[in-house]
Amino acid sequence: GDIQSKRHLMSFHVDVQTFQAMRRPDATPQAVLRAARRAAATEQLSYYDDALIYRLEQMGKELFDGRLVRIEMGIKRGYWHSEFNRFRYDVELVVGEPSSLPPPVLQRRSYADVCAALKIPCVDEVALGKADIQRYVAEQVQALGDDVDGLVITMPNARVLRPVRLLTWLEEAVKDGRSLHELPTWLHPVDM
């Protein structure tokens, strides 16, 4: 089904409210945050907590009589990175015959691990080169032992990075007494 991330609920509303506020010369970061909190509190759509997917994986055997084969979660597709797809995901519960195979053994690497290996600052805004990532993944896969089935690497979600950073900037702007019109250009909401 089509789901939205609860973790990004405030970021979503901050993005929308900032876009609307930038048209008003008297708008303040505090007013934007207040409007975003109000909108988030009265939201009528269903949002999921990230822990839900993990819990389903852990409890799948009990909930689905052992028939939950896997959970597939993908980025909502769209032609534009708008609020209609940037904060949404498609989740599919794949049900089949119970498997007698043990669950796969996976090794995990964090974004910090990737940055350390590539000797670059661990800052979300730093773009990683495609060749560097490909080389890193190839090296990590080659180094996996025979007892490991795969590798999972967590990376920042570029689709929501700007709205998440916008929320942080607004919270800091309220503390520092900054104007909404001091908002860095790269944080401006995009009209799609």
Image (cartoon, rainbow, N blue to C red):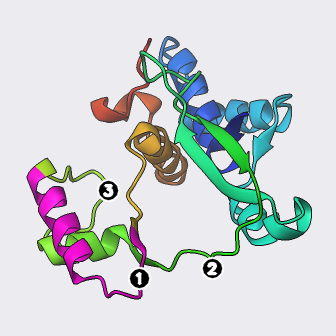
- Mark 3 lies on residue: 124
Query: How far, Cα to Cα, is label 3 from label 1?
Result: 29 Å
Considering the whole magenta stretch, tell me its main secondary structure: helix
SS assignment at label 1: loop
Residues at badges 3 and 1 in contact (C-beta under 8 Å)?
no
- Mark 2 lies on residue: 102
Query: How far, Cα to Cα, is label 2 from label 3?
Result: 35 Å
Where is the N terminus found, in terms of image quarters? top right
**Is residue 64 visible in the rendered structure shown here?**
yes
Callout 3 amino acid: Asp
- 122 left or right, relative to 94: left
- 167 left or right, relative to 145: right
Q: Position of residue 77 (x, y in %)?
A: 49, 25
Q: Position of residue 36 (x, y in %)?
A: 68, 33
Q: Which numbered disc flags the more N-terminal residue, 2 or 1?
A: 2
Task: Count neighbours of disc 2 (C-alpha within 10 A) and say few if under 14, some if 14 to 19, many if 20 or more.
Answer: few
Segment colored magenta: 131-151
Q: Nearer the viewer, residue 124 or 67?
A: 67
Q: Nearer the viewer, residue 91 or 17?
A: 91
Query: How far, Cα to Cα, is label 2 from label 1?
Result: 12 Å
Q: Nearer the viewer, mark 2 or mark 1?
A: 2
| 150 in magenta | yes
Q: Position of residue 151 (x, y in %)?
A: 38, 71
Mark seen at residue 55? none
Asked which quadrant contains residue 2, the reply is top right
Mark seen at residue 148? 1
Callout 1 amino acid: Val
Identify the residue at horizontal 18%, vertical 58% (top origin): 133
Identify the residue at horizontal 11%, vertical 59% (top origin): 132
| 29 in magenta | no
Q: Is residue 113 above or below residue 7?
A: below
Q: Position of residue 30 (x, y in %)?
A: 61, 38
